[in-house]
Image: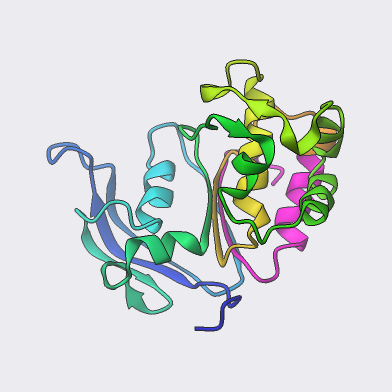
Amino acid sequence: EAAHTPLSVEMQQVKFGYHESLPVLNNVSFHVPSGHTLCIMGAAGAGKSSILRLLTGSYRAFEGNILVNGLPIGNYDHDSLRACIGILFHQQDIFQGTLYENITMGDTSLKMGDILELAQKIGIYSFITSLKDGFDTMIDPAGKRLSGTVTRKILLLRALISRPRLLLVEEPWQGFDDQSQKMIKDYLLNDTLKTTVIVATNDEAF
């Protein structure tokens, strides 16, 4: 596979629930062509997050079919599939380590200059440059010293920096100031040509 070809994804009549008696998704079908952007809206508990999680390959107990680049998702090795997906989910957290390690997740091929350039595009450059130790700043487990907004900025950088072939993000600008929100929306709509983007948000402006 060409390493930077965006992934196409498709759900066909997917039924899914975390408990057998409580289906979260019932006969959901949609197709997102390679390189397109999709916004999923719906009330709390409607299943937006479940759709994103199913597309990571983490849950296999569903009915119907999920196709990634035309191939059933169960045919992929889970780790290699995850390696080409950028994710930002509510339950994610940061870990004990430096800011650089938290952004790159061990991918030492990522250059600090590229991270700073992306940080500028999505409005979080000033946060990094305000830290005395910059990328070497040690971060506490569970982000005890960081606000929820700062934690989400780090997680968003993490999701975007590897230029993923598929990006799955949940309310990516929640709690950010208006300017940062606008920059992130502009980035997702205009700067992700090599990525298929699925955003779960009820932000009608987006």
Judge whether residue 205 is colored magenta: yes
Please name the residue shown 53% across and 74% down the image. Answer: 33
Q: Is residue 182 left or right of residue 25?
A: right
Rendered position, 197 above or below 1: above
Residue situated in front as seen by the camera: 110 or 121: 110
Residue 131 in the figure: left or right of residue 9? right
Q: Position of residue 47 (x, y in %)?
A: 38, 42
How many callouts does the rendering have?
A: 0
Q: Residue at x 40, y 58 (%)?
A: 55
25 or 117, nearer to the observer: 117
Residue 179 drawn in magenta = no
Q: Which residues are magenta?
A: 181-206
Q: Residue at x 23, y 64 (%)?
A: 64
Place of residue 128 in the rendered image (x, y in percent of width and height, measured from the top left)? 80, 34
Residue 61 left/right relative to 79: left
In percent of width and height, residue 34 lies at: 55, 75
Residue at the spot 77% in from the left edge and 62% down from the top edge: 190
| Res. 69 image quadrant | bottom left
User: 182 or 82, which is in the foreground?
Assistant: 82
